[in-house]
Amino acid sequence: MSLLPRNRNAHPPAYAPGYKSSVPRSPSKALISGVATASEQTGPMFGHEVLGERDNNLILNFTGQPAIGERIIVHGRVLDEYRRPVPGALLEIWQANAGGRYRHKKDSYLAPLDPNFGGCGRTITGEDGSYEFLTIRPGAYPWPNGPNDWRPMHIHFSVFGHSFGQRLITQMYFEGDPLIARCPIVNTIPDKSVVDRLVAPLDMTRALPLDCLAYKFDIVLRGQRQTMFENKPEGM
Amino acid sequence: MVQPLDYLEESPSQTAGPYVHIGCTPNFVGIEGIYDQDLGLAPFPDDAPGERITVTGTVYDGTGTALRDVLIETWQAGADGTFGPGAQGWCRMPSDLETGEFVLNTVKPGATGKQAPHISLWIVARGINIGLQTRMYFEGDDHSADPLLNRLEHQNRRGTLIARDTGNGTYRFDIRLQGEGETVFLDL
Ligand SMILES: [Fe+2]
């Protein structure tokens, strides 16, 4: 097995001046490329014993009383580039509350905190790579970058596959949000068709009548090549 | 025309942003009661075999300012050079919110094949658009056969991947994202 190389052209570059924070935090020298070694092929695996009963229910997991906002299911599958499901993948998410405010001392936005919303959740994918969260739709919020920049509604995702080299953090956006195209962070991704892969469609097949809407968000991790003809690079 | 290659492509990365701790280390930023404890507090149990070491360091941006909102994950072999089981060998370190310093208490990894003992790092923060991969080797080890260190074109940058031995099992490893002394970042 070996990890497929990352297609860096389908990711944001480190230096993306429209997102000002990237200017001093971007390496200026070329990355050193190579074949993944045991250190990248292997990675931490998490068992279901780390999960609490309400870890994937952001509506209830902070106080047990329901958070304010539009109730939504966010579900999907974690796959690799060969379309194989990735079971046992730990997903951690975080998001603003319905008003666009994070529970964080550095967030001083006007919108109030919701006493019943913490803002994080986690789950582990099943055998078919599937996962599900129950949460509220996060609000859009302004942020200091340009004079009037706003983040579209989004949920942050941290994903572990089976290899440390598959480690990924990304963000899910919502179908139809006009702020997506205006967002300097979204626009760090040079290719609009690549951005589309982060936009979750409304999924009425999973919406629950008189209860909640649903959005489907699939995540793709680097592929694990499997071939009987592979030569092992020496010493790797 | 040919048959389509119907593979998928990896989801694009987006920055972890300024609030990554809410998702990854909520207890560390005062969001208590959702998870019993944050994941990755220690890479190994206290009784794991091997030499205990402590690595401290700071991540600096291109202006020389310490990042106080950075999250670093480490992944390493145990003292015997093997990985796992489970999440053993993995650690998650938020830098100190005031000083930016991170502290890794771990066991010194063994060599894996020709690779000299090293710890893999993955660094995310606001302003980092895709997680940065790098490695920490250790001053005093034999690096002469290490394939990765030997293939660096600019050998004068090699030192950025080697933690300085500060005595009694302690090491110093600073990371510079940009500019003079810029750390070597990897694409493996
Ligand atoms: Fe956000």
Image: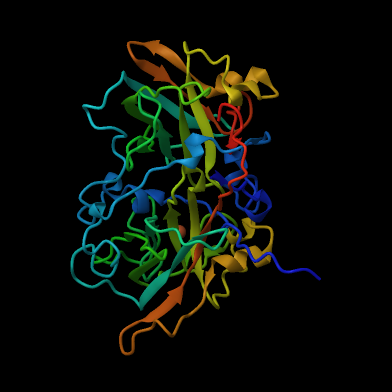
Q: Is residue B164 left or right of residue A236?
A: left
Report how many numbered discs are placed on residues in the image: 0
Residue A124: name its quadrant: bottom left
Residue A148: name its quadrant: bottom right
Residue at the image point whose x is 51% and y is 43% from the top: A165
Residue at the image point whose x is 23% and y is 53% from the top: A49
Residue A182 visible somewhere in the drawing = no
Q: B180 or B163: nearer the eye?
A: B163
Residue A208 visible somewhere in the drawing = yes
Task: Check the image and report above or below for B10 versus A181.
Answer: above
Residue at the image point whose x is 36% and y is 63% from the top: A126
Q: Position of residue A125 (x, y in %)?
A: 37, 61
Residue at the image point whose x is 59% and y is 63% from the top: A183
Query: Quadrant of the image for the C terminus of chain A?
Result: top right
Which residue in the rendered view is the most extreme toward the bottom? A210
Which residue in the rendered view is the most extreme toward the right? B1
Task: Check the image and report above or below for B34 versus A14.
Answer: below
